[in-house]
Image (cartoon, helix red, strand yellow):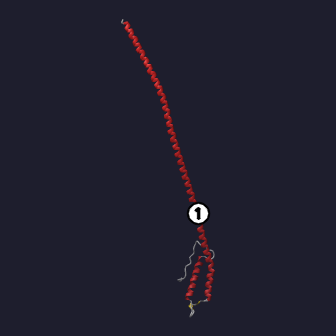
């Protein structure tokens, strides 16, 4: 292998129709041979021109020309594959962004639902506390009213008891007076 030759390498990812990647390297190799042929050509005396073998130069140009369409096809294939990869990546990026937006909306909605539920729970607790306070006040008023009535009844009962006792004392006192008078009459006073 000379300094200008490159070993054939096959790219497994490229299509292998007709001539493959080997032709691309062959084109490069042919261009190097043409450069070497020009560099080694005999100069024309008294000019900057060189002498080349016409048949050999025309053969190399024909080989290059026949290999170029394959090179162009491969280049187009690489560009097309690049565009497909970019399009796929763009589609994937768009899908991921849409999923992220959807998830964000879901989380916001979920947060709003949680906040609304918390507000409603707070309102219910406040209402329950207010109702409990009102019920305590109502119960206190009821008990106070009952105790006031009971106090009135007890006061009336106490007054009746006091009157009864006073009457009883008056009778006892009256009976004692009668007894004393009777005792005084019996002693002959």
Seen from the viewer's position, the closer of residues 8 and 74 is: 74
- Residue 173, horizontal then vertical, whole percent: 40, 15
Query: Where is the N terminus found, in terms of image quarters?
Result: bottom right
Examine the rendered structure and indicate whether residue 148 appears above or below residue 180: below
- Quarter of the image where one finds residue 55: bottom right
Examine the rendered structure and indicate whether residue 76 appears above or below residue 188: below
Query: Where is the C terminus found, in terms of image quarters?
Result: top left
- Residue 83, horizontal then vertical, whole percent: 60, 70
| Point 51% across, 37% down: residue | 135
- Residue 132, horizontal then vertical, whole percent: 50, 39
- Quarter of the image where one finds residue 12: bottom right
Q: Which residue is mark 1?
A: 94
Seen from the viewer's position, the closer of residues 49 and 8 is: 49
- Residue 159, horizontal then vertical, whole percent: 45, 23
| Point 51% across, 41% down: residue | 130
| Point 43% across, 19% down: residue | 166
User: Left or right: 171 with respect to 72?
Assistant: left
CA neighbours of label 1 inside 10 A, class few (<14), some (14 to 19), many (20+): few
Seen from the viewer's position, the closer of residues 58 and 148 is: 148
Helix, strand or loop at label 1? It is helix
- Quarter of the image where one finds residue 79: bottom right
């Amino acid at each position: 292998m000379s300094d200008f030759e490159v070993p054939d390498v096959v790219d497994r990812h490229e299509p292998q129709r007709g001539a493959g990647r080997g032709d691309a390297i062959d084109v490069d190799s042919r261009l190097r041979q043409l450069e070497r042929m020009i560099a080694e050509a005999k100069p024309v005396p008294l000019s900057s021109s060189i002498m080349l073998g016409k048949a050999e130069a025309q053969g190399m140009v024909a080989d290059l020309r026949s290999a170029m369409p394959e090179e162009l096809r491969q280049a187009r294939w690489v560009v097309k594959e690049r565009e497909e990869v970019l399009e796929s990546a763009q589609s994937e990026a768009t899908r991921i962004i849409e999923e992220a937006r959807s998830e964000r909306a879901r989380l916001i909605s979920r947060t709003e639902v949680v906040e609304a539920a918390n507000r409603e729970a707070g309102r219910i607790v406040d209402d329950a506390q207010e109702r409990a306070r009102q019920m305590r006040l109502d119960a206190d008023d009821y008990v106070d009213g009952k105790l006031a009535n009971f106090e009135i009844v007890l006061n009336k009962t106490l007054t009746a008891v006091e009157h009864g006792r006073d009457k009883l004392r008056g009778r006892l006192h009256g009976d004692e007076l009668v007894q004393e008078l009777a005792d005084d009459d019996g002693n002959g006073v």
